[in-house]
Image (cartoon, grey):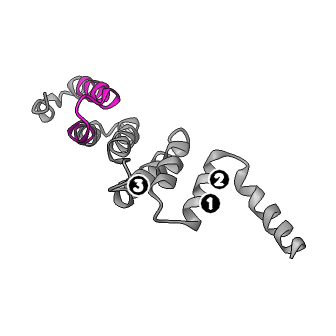
Amino acid sequence: VISFQSIQTIMRNSAWRDSTSLFTTGVAINPTNARLHTFAGRSLVDTDLHRAEGHFRKSLEYGRDAGLDEQSYNDLGRALALQGRYAEALEEFKEAVRIKPGYSDAVNNIGYCKRRLKLQGKVHRCRSHF
């Protein structure tokens, strides 16, 4: 019994090498855990925006009553904005503010997206929020 548990511990240690492997391994074990998807997405934002976006979408899908909604919408918006998808990102930031009025991170991100869209000549798409 002890040797079996030791082997399991050694095998699990590889998941602890960095935050990305820790959280993505956690998601593989518990794929409907919204919080794990949130943390997996955040760990991937600097290295793989498409995978991060997928985890944020899963977090929203599974985390409806977990108190993560406004954070997950803001995280998803950030991943979209970093991909240059400002109009899509703007909608996610708006949803975060709708859920939690005055949510400063999302409000700031709305301003950032509006500036980026204005620079791209697409400001007409985002005037309706404020």
Q: Nearer the viewer, residue 126 or 92?
A: 92
* Dot 2: element: helix
Residue 124 picture location, percent across and down? 11, 31
Q: Which amino acid type is shown beneath numbered disc 3? A: Ser
- On screen, 127 above or below 5? above
* Dot 3: element: helix
Question: Which contiguous range is marked in magenta?
Answer: 94-116
Q: Which mark is residue 25?
A: 1
Q: Are marks 2 and 1 in contact (CB under 8 Å)?
A: yes
- On screen, 54 above or below 91? below
Identify which residue is drawn at 73% across, 48% down: 17
Identify which residue is drawn at 57% across, 65% down: 28
Q: Say which quarter of the image contains residue 89.
A: top left
Q: Residues within 10 Å of mark 1 (few under 14, many from 20)?
A: some
Magenta stretch, main secondary structure class = helix
In this view, which residue lies farthest toward the bottom?
A: 1
- On screen, 64 above or below 72? below
Viewer-side label of 2, 3: 3
Residue 129 picture location, percent across and down? 14, 32
For this view, does 124 lie left or right of residue 3?
A: left
Gap in angstroms between the C-alphas marked 2 and 3? 17 Å
Q: Which amino acid type is shown beneath numbered disc 2? A: Ser
Residue 58 picture location, percent across and down? 40, 58
Q: Nearer the viewer, residue 49 or 15?
A: 15
Identify which residue is drawn at 38% across, 37% down: 78
Identify residue for label 3: 59
Identify residue for label 2: 21
N-term mark: 2 or 3: 2
Q: How many marks?
A: 3
Residue 77 picture location, percent across and down? 34, 40
> Is residue 23 highlighted in magenta?
no
* Dot 1: element: helix
